[in-house]
Every structure is written in structure tokens, then in C-alpha cells.
């Protein structure tokens, strides 16, 4: 049997990858046609291809023109319009070929389909697959069966099986390989299907029918996007990324990867394949602003399943199935992306106290209702429970939005979002005929008390800026959200002072924004971790938002354009940008980057239209809303100076 030979992989950047997904899980595809990261059947399942975080021995699937040296990078790649189907095209001396990668939508067994189409001439092609379940640890048993005259290859490591169908693959100790030639007008499809090893072989499906069905579903979803404006391409692509991270069960993962480093070669490597209540709430809010409420309804149902009608089970993140135990461990056998150790699975931050979370949840519930999602008595009961939890705990120190692994502090952003939790609760309860005046008065008093506390203890009058935490001097980019959530209006001198201080002290040479100083004046780390990190893309979008809100529209648009230029050629963003190395860093693609991209595009579009959105209508029988801050669209404050 021939051996599976692939030359040492070239150094690849995070942004060299594309992403395909089924909403149940996803995979990263490098620009040379190599899938080097895939977890089946769920985002948080163990990876069957993990060479992204190691070497070829840890699993990959390459499909492209046959070469004797380094795999050839595709001459062109693109997403098919309105879909998550990813095309790569190669021009060779003998002809041209296209490979279309996608994952069918639906609740059937997860599947990766790779369709090969000859465009001109003839091209020699190679499919080289090395399945290594268990994050590159396990070597599967390959067996061959026939069904209806079709040979099927199955790689099994209990409790999982991976069925490889299509062109005949030979098996060697290192994996499976197929060499074939594709001519102009010819099509060949290769599929990899996950199934429990205790189940019979999955049914064979027509790859072309699956492609047509899946793309029709993607385009139908895209067609319902309500945004019309100058940033159409960026908004739609980001929305598709967000939709891809929305699991059919209602949970929404932060990213499909783990341990892509925030600091190349460092330890700031985390597993993002879980449902952060904050990140998922922000995703729901943004999709609702685009007219997509189905995801909000599924997320609300998932949230009720995770929390019930109370807050006893409240934590900051869960597994996709609502699992609470996300024990963090290190995979010592993986060297990490560009030797960035450790590789982590699970996330120890699940046990942290983060007081901002009820605020994002309440804001998302309001946004969803504003967008047309019907009210729910169970959701109202949960909302009240979260408000009571906030009332009991808002005055405590916490780990904050950035999940510091140092001491708890009274983070200003956490207190502001505690205020937002009560503010949004009041707004929603005013719409319920059953709400009493006494209940509203109680929550209004609490809201005012939190507001006064933040303004007294979280503001430095000498520097005219809010600070990262009570009594501190450091800044924090999360303070940029103060005007966006309506805590203070954008023309308040304290808001303007904070924006300008952050722009002055936390910006890089390119004008992008760091989350906070990772080192104090003596060079000591302040967040419990070694090393540095890049500019945080979400914070940079927040700055563009704030600049627009205080009337600096040209500056806001210029910053937004520079941020859009950081996307890779497919329109994808990781979590951060390394200003020294000029490359994307962190998990990829990142919901927390694509959410503010859309939000900023919406704000700049509204500002360019020179009018504020109309005030939302009150449901019949609802109590009148208190007017505070600026007008809102789906729970996100708007302003144009």
C-alpha cells in the first residue's frame, strides 16, 4: 500500500483559514485546501483534525492538486454568495479545478462534503486524510464495507465512527489517500460523516442535493436581513458567521476553536467552544437588530432550560447542552499553535463571578421583544430572578468582563451592567399589565442607587474619566460602553473625558484599542497572566461607536474602515490584532468581533442618514416607559453627536 506523504506544512497564519459550519459544529479550512481543525459532532466535541494546534500527526484532511513539495495555496477562494459554502480554485499547468467545501444544515448526522469540479483541462488531485480523534491522540481502526456496489471506508475509535465516501481511498498506517484525475466539466464528491460507533452506517446522501438544499436555506436566511446600507457585504458576512455559531439547540458558542493564542508563543490560550451568556446575549441582540428573531427565541428557550425560572443555576457559561461542569485541563501532547502552550480544553472561568452577565441577558430579552419576539411568562419569571440576584450581589467585587485570573475588584463595567440589568427589567415590566407600581418603584430605587454609586466611586474627577475599578487609576476599554448602554448620555463631559482618555492611553499606533494595560508601571502583570496581548477588536469597534456618538463622525468612519481592512479575504476576524506582528490572533472566527462590527455599521449608517431611529411603540395596556439616555433600537443605544 502507498504511504501517506505530505511534506511539512508551511507556516500558516490564523487568517489563512476559512470557516465552514452546519450550526451544530464547524471546521477550519486552510488556503491550501487542508482542513486542520474539526470537532464532531458538536463544537465542543473532541477534535478529529487538530493539526492546527500541533503537527500533521494530530490529524488533517487535505484535498487539492497533487504536488511533490509544499501543498499549493489556492489561486482564488471565496464564499458563495449568501452562504457558508467555501470555494478554492487552483490553476495548474494542465488545467484548473475548483473545490467547494460545506457542511449540510439540519439535524442529521454531521457531515463535511468536499465537491471537486474540473474547470479546464485535466488536473491530478490528491485527497489525504489522517483522522486522529481525541485531539490527535487516537489512531482509528479502518474498515471497508460495500453497500449497493459502493465501497465505504470507516475509521472507528469508540464511541465515534467517521465514514469516508466518494473516491476510492487506500489505507496505510498513517491514514487514507486517494489519487485521481478530474477533467473539465467532471464532478467528484468526497464526504466524511460522523456517526456513533454503535450505530449502523449512515445513509448515503446525494452531495449535490445536499449542496442545493443547504445553500437554499442559507440564502433564505440571508434574504431576511433588514440591513440596507453601505456596509452590506461586511454586515451580511458577519451575520452568517454569527448564525453559523448558533447551535440548533439554542446555545451560541463564542468561537469554534480552542487555544489559538492571544500572544503568539505565550500562555493566553483559552477554549471558546462554549456558551457564554454575555457573548450569546450580544449575538442575539445584534441578530435581532437585523430582523432575525428565530435565534432569539431558540436562545431564550435554551436559557430557560439552563436556568429555569430562577437564578440558582446561574453561571457565566455552559456547554451547548446546558452542561455546568466545564473543567479546564491542558493537553500536553499538543505543542500548540506556533508553540503557544498550553492547549486548554474546558474553561475554568465558568466558576467566576461576573456581575455584568444579567445586564447583557436582560438587554437581549428586550432587544428580542422589540424585534417582534412574543413575551413569555417563564422568561419574565427568569428576568425577575436575575434582577433579584443582581440586587443581592451588585455591591460585591468580581472578576469582570475580561475574566481576570487575579484578585476580584469592584469593576466599573460590572456595576454599569448591573444598572443595565435593572434598567432593562424596568422597561420590560412596564409593558406587563400585571406589574404593580410598588414593584416598579422598588426597581427604580435600586437602579438609581447603583447609578449614584458608580458615579461617586468609579469616576476620577481629577482626570475627568471613569476608571477600571473603584479607587483605581487604570483605564479599561469596557468603559466605552457607558454611553452605548445609556448609563450616561454621550454629551456628558464625563463620557467625553473617558473616551478621550482611552483613545489617548489605550490606543496603538494604528488607533486600535487594548482592553486594559496588562502591566503596571513596574512591569508586573496585573491580570494574573504572563505576556502581552494584541489590540482587542471589539474594543476598537466600541471606540468607533463612541466617536460617532459624540459627533466625531469622520474619525469614526476612518477607524471603522481600518478595522474592516483587518478582515481576511473572506471577511473573517479573530479576537485580536497583534500590532507588532500585523496579524490576527486569538480564537477564530470570533463572535465577539463580528457582533460589534455589525453594531458599528448600523450606527454609522444611521448617522449617515442624519436621523435617529423612531422610538419603539408601546404595547397596549403597558405602563409608559421612563425616558432616559438616548433613543434605542432593539436595546442598543443610538446617537450621532
Image (tube, helix red, strand yellow):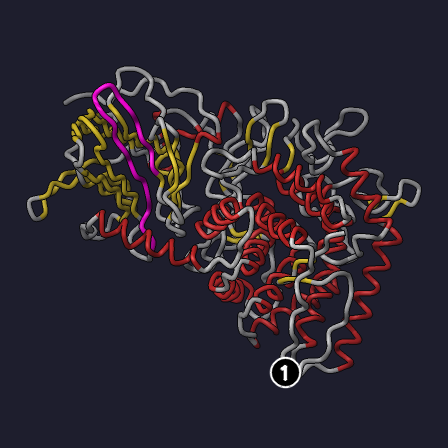
Q: Is residue 249 left or right of residue 99?
A: right
Residue 187 in view in this figure: yes
Residue 91 is a magenta residue: yes
Mark 1 closeness class: few <14, some 14–19, many ≥20 residues within 10 Å: few
Q: Nearer the viewer, residue 487 or 194?
A: 487
Task: Return the residue found at the far right.
Answer: 462
For the image, the number of numbered tags is: 1
Assign the magenta stretch its main secondary structure: strand
Quadrant occupied by the N terminus: top left
- On the image, the x and y values in percent for residue 421 come to 70, 62
Q: Which residues are magenta?
A: 87-105
Residue 135 in view in this figure: no
Task: Return the residue found at the far left.
Answer: 149
Work out whether 256 lies above or below 283: above
- On the image, the x and y values in percent for residue 340 come to 53, 26
Q: Nearer the viewer, residue 614 or 594?
A: 614
- On the image, the x and y values in percent for residue 193 come to 26, 45
- Describe the element under mark 1 as helix, strand or loop: loop
* Residue located at (77% from left, 61% from top): 629
Residue at the spot of label 1: 620
Q: Nearer the viewer, residue 404 or 640?
A: 640
Work out whether 430 lies above or below 346: below
Q: Nearer the viewer, residue 23 or 357?
A: 23
* Residue located at (31% from left, 31% from top): 89
- On the image, the x and y values in percent for residue 382 come to 60, 69
* Residue located at (23% from left, 27% from top): 126
Q: Is residue 73 left or right of residue 544?
A: left
Question: Hey, which quadrant is residue 527 in on the image?
Answer: top right
Residue 425 is a magenta residue: no
* Residue located at (38% from left, 48% from top): 83
Amino acid at each position: 500500500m502507498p504511504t501517506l506523504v505530505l511534506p511539512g506544512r508551511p507556516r500558516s497564519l490564523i487568517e489563512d483559514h476559512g470557516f465552514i459550519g452546519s450550526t451544530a459544529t464547524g471546521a477550519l479550512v486552510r488556503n491550501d485546501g487542508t482542513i486542520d481543525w474539526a470537532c464532531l459532532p458538536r463544537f465542543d466535541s473532541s477534535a478529529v483534525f487538530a493539526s492546527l494546534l500541533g503537527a500533521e500527526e494530530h490529524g488533517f484532511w487535505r484535498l487539492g492538486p497533487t504536488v511533490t513539495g509544499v501543498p499549493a495555496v489556492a489561486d482564488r477562494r471565496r464564499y458563495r454568495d449568501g452562504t457558508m459554502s467555501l470555494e478554492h480554485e487552483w490553476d495548474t499547468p494542465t488545467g484548473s479545478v475548483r473545490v467547494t467545501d460545506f457542511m449540510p444544515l439540519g439535524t442529521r448526522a454531521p457531515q463535511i462534503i468536499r465537491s471537486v469540479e474540473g474547470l479546464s483541462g485535466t488536473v491530478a488531485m490528491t485527497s489525504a486524510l489522517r483522522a486522529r480523534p481525541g485531539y490527535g491522540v487516537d489512531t482509528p481502526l479502518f474498515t471497508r464495507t460495500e453497500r449497493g456496489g459502493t465501497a465505504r471506508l470507516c475509521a472507528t475509535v469508540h464511541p465515534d465512527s467517521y465514514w469516508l465516501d466518494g473516491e476510492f481511498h487506500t489505507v496505510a498506517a498513517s491514514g487514507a489517500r486517494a489519487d485521481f484525475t478530474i477533467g473539465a466539466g467532471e464532478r467528484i464528491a468526497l464526504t466524511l460523516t460522523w456517526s456513533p460507533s454503535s450505530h449502523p452506517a449512515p445513509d448515503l446522501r446525494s452531495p449535490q442535493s445536499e449542496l442545493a438544499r443547504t445553500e437554499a436555506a442559507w440564502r433564505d436566511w440571508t434574504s431576511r436581513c433588514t440591513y440596507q446600507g453601505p456596509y452590506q457585504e461586511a454586515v451580511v458576512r458577519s451575520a452568517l458567521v454569527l448564525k453559523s455559531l448558533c447551535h440548533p439547540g439554542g446555545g451560541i458558542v463564542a468561537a469554534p476553536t480552542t487555544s489559538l493564542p492571544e500572544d503568539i508563543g505565550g500562555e493566553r490560550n483559552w477554549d471558546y467552544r462554549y456558551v457564554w451568556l454575555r457573548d450569546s446575549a450580544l449575538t442575539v441582540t445584534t441578530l435581532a437588530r437585523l430582523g432575525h428573531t428565530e435565534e432569539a427565541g431558540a436562545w431564550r428557550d435554551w436559557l430557560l432550560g439552563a436556568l429555569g425560572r430562577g437564578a440558582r443555576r446561574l453561571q457565566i457559561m455552559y456547554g451547548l447542552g446546558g452542561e455546568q461542569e466545564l473543567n479546564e485541563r491542558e493537553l500536553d501532547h499538543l505543542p500548540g499553535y506556533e508553540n503557544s502552550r498550553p492547549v486548554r480544553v474546558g474553561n475554568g472561568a465558568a466558576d467566576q463571578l461576573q456581575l455584568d452577565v444579567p445586564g447583557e441577558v436582560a438587554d437581549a430579552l428586550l432587544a428580542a421583544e422589540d424585534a417582534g419576539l412574543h413575551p413569555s411568562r417563564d422568561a419574565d419569571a427568569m428576568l425577575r430572578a436575575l434582577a433579584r440576584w443582581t440586587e443581592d450581589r451588585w455591591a460585591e467585587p468580581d472578576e469582570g468582563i475580561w475574566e481576570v485570573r487575579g484578585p476580584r475588584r469592584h469593576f466599573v463595567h460590572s456595576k454599569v451592567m448591573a444598572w443595565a440589568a435593572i434598567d432593562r427589567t424596568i422597561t420590560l415590566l412596564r409593558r406587563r399589565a400585571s406589574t404593580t407600581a410598588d414593584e416598579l418603584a422598588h426597581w427604580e430605587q435600586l437602579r438609581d442607587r447603583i447609578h449614584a454609586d458608580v458615579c461617586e466611586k468609579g469616576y476620577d474627577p481629577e482626570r475627568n474619566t471613569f476608571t477600571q475599578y473603584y479607587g483605581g487609576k487604570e483605564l479599561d476599554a469596557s468603559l466605552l460602553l457607558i454611553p452605548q448602554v445609556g448609563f450616561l448620555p454621550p454629551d456628558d463631559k464625563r463620557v467625553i473625558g473617558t473616551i478621550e482618555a482611552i483613545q489617548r492611553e489605550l490606543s496603538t499606533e494604528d488607533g486600535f484599542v487594548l482592553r486594559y494595560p496588562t502591566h503596571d508601571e513596574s512591569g508586573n502583570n496585573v491580570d494574573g497572566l504572563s505576556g502581552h496581548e494584541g489590540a482587542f477588536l471589539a474594543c476598537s469597534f466600541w471606540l468607533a461607536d463612541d466617536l460617532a456618538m459624540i459627533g466625531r463622525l469622520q474619525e469614526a468612519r476612518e477607524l471603522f474602515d481600518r478595522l474592516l481592512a483587518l478582515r481576511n479575504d473572506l471577511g473573517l476576524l479573530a479576537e485580536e490584532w497583534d500590532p507588532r506582528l500585523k496579524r490576527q490572533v486569538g480564537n477564530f472566527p470570533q463572535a465577539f468581533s463580528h457582533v460589534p462590527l455589525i453594531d458599528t455599521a448600523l450606527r454609522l449608517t444611521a448617522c449617515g442618514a442624519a436621523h435617529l431611529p423612531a422610538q419603539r411603540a408601546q404595547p397596549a395596556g403597558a405602563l409608559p416607559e421612563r425616558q432616559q439616555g438616548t433613543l434605542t433600537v432593539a436595546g442598543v443605544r443610538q446617537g450621532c453627536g
